[in-house]
């Protein structure tokens, strides 16, 4: 199957020169980096797909906004512009800026979750899980079963398993569940979308048991685009209408603006009703952790760029192009018989490295081996989401086996062009052709926690 690349709905006004190293130079660099891609200098990377977070290209409008940003400590003009944008897009009464997504979690979650309480999500993103635990709670995932099989092509693999959610609430006792979180799109499941119907069903369960519902909203526009494509009821709705509908079912949202709001730094908290009691607690946490309410850890110029980026991320031509890029790459991989979490999600493509390297066991990190090969092959930096990232059992010290061995190609917004995508596909195909000869890695040194950022690896020969 061929698929047409959706041409960029913009033209380029400013460029950033990239260095192209030779294969020999790259082999030297990755060896010096102890086979850990986080240790590479960005200037030694040709196509950086490490993350789509904060790596987006701002528009000329946003850069113009940077110049007019009001840097007043209190009551900045840019703050009020952001308030208007947030209320307009989400239909929420209260909007609070913070410096990034995990700051939103840090400010909001302790207000909703206390010691011994549970929080249940379709799937928690890692910082979100961490902030539930830091607030004294426990985090439980209830994602639909089809999310766990990369080969099943279902339209909404990000959904909550609503029956399982209700059963879990009954099992734990509703008084012990402090919060339900819907992550849209579902990042950890591969950027998979959540349907509006699923949100309605989850909301009904939350109302029945009196549990507040929060949206982890990093990729809310990509999610709305998928809803428009895949959910019959919304095929004639605008992205804005779908977003409004989706958010109307929750009580609060916490958001990393470094994704769909197309800025390099920023985050938001939203409260649907004019709940001053809740807002007072959020304000108190914000002022002590992030800064005064009218800047929330951001510069005035950041507030301004964010107010503009929220709208740009909702533009349908932009979303058609953005999701189109991923679908273009996915179609090439389908033709080459390369397996990935299918159908492709919103912000990245998650290659099934277990399928590509059946000879490499989980404790020799197949997805890390693929990430290293991609760098050697074409200077592409990706990240491993598998047993290497998962780490060791804290009690026994033994390597844990992850459910998936994914190599993630996360795509920054408005940054790479069709030729870059062809390079990604060609590199993956070249590696697949010599897949039998690829060997795994062992860990030479590792820190106690979050080892994947720092560990040293060596090839098994
Ligand atoms: C990125 C992300 C976060 C955390 O946001 P930061 O801006 O990186 O702090 C939380 N939840 C989801 C779903 C994310 O993708």
Image (tube, rainbow, N blue to C red):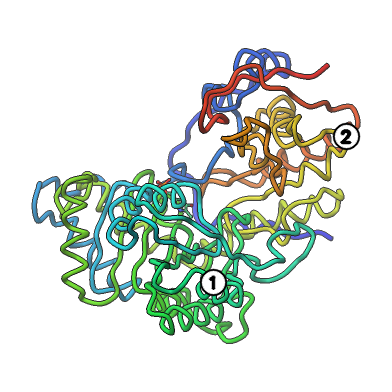
Report which quarter residue 438 is drawn in: top right
Give the secondary structure at mark 1: helix
- Which of 414 and 251 lies nearest the eye of the viewer? 251
As drawn, the label of residue 308 is none
| Position above or below: 400 against 230 | above
Q: Is residue 5 left or right of residue 134?
A: right
Which quadrant is the C terminus positioned in?
top right
Residue drawn at 50 percent across, 52 percent down? 125
Q: Please name the residue that numbered disc 2 is placed on.
A: 359
Mark 2 or mark 1: which comes first in sequence? 1
Q: Is residue 213 left or right of residue 440?
A: left
Which quadrant is the N terminus positioned in?
bottom right
Real-space Cα distance between discs 2 and 1? Answer: 41 Å
Q: Is residue 282 left or right of residue 26?
A: left
Residue drawn at 68 percent across, 56 percent down? 5
Q: Mark 2–mark 1 contact, CB under 8 Å? A: no
As drawn, the label of residue 171 is 1
Q: Residues within 10 Å of mark 2 (few under 14, many from 20)?
A: some
């Amino acid at each position: 199957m061929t698929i047409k690349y959706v041409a960029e709905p913009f033209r380029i006004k400013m460029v950033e020169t990239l260095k192209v190293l030779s294969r020999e130079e790259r082999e030297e660099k990755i060896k010096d980096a102890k086979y850990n891609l986080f240790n590479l200098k960005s200037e030694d990377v040709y196509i950086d797909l490490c993350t789509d977070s904060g790596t987006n290209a701002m528009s000329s409008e946003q850069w113009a906004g940077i110049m007019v940003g009001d840097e007043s400590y209190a009551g900045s003009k840019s703050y009020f512009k952001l308030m208007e944008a947030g209320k307009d897009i989400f239909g929420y009464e209260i909007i609070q800026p913070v410096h990034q997504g995990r700051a939103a979690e840090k400010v909001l979650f302790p207000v909703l979750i206390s010691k011994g309480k549970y929080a249940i999500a379709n799937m928690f993103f890692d910082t979100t899980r961490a902030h539930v635990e830091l607030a004294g709670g426990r985090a439980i995932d209830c994602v639909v079963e089809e999310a766990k099989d990369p080969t099943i092509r279902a339209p909404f693999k990000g959904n909550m398993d609503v029956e399982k959610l209700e059963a879990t609430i009954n099992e734990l006792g509703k008084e012990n569940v402090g919060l339900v979180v819907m992550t849209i799109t579902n990042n950890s499941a591969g950027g998979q979308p959540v349907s509006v119907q699923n949100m309605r069903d989850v909301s009904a369960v939350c109302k029945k048991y009196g549990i507040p519902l929060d949206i982890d909203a990093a990729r809310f526009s990509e999610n709305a685009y998928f809803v428009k494509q895949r959910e019959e009821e919304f095929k004639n709705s605008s992205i804005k209408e779908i977003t409004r509908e989706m958010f109307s079912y929750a009580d609060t949202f916490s958001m990393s603006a470094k994704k769909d709001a197309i800025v390099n730094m920023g985050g938001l908290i939203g409260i649907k009703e004019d709940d001053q009691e809740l807002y007072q607690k959020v304000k108190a946490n914000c002022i002590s952790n992030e800064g005064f309410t009218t800047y929330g850890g951001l510069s005035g110029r950041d507030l301004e760029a964010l107010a503009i980026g929220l709208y740009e991320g909702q533009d349908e031509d932009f979303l058609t192009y953005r999701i189109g890029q991923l679908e273009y790459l996915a179609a090439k991989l389908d033709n080459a018989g390369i397996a990935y979490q299918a159908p492709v999600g919103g912000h990245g493509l998650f290659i099934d490295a277990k399928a590509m390297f059946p000879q490499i066991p989980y404790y020799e990190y197949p997805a890390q081996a693929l990430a290293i090969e991609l760098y050697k092959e074409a200077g592409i930096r990706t990240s491993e989401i598998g047993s290497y990232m998962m780490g060791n059992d804290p009690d026994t010290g033994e390597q844990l086996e992850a459910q998936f061995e994914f190599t993630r190609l996360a795509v920054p917004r408005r940054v790479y062009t069709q030729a870059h995508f062809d390079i990604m596909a060609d590199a993956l195909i070249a590696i697949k052709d010599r897949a039998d000869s690829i060997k795994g890695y062992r860990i030479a040194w590792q820190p106690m926690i979050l080892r994947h950022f720092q560990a040293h690896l060596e090839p098994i020969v």
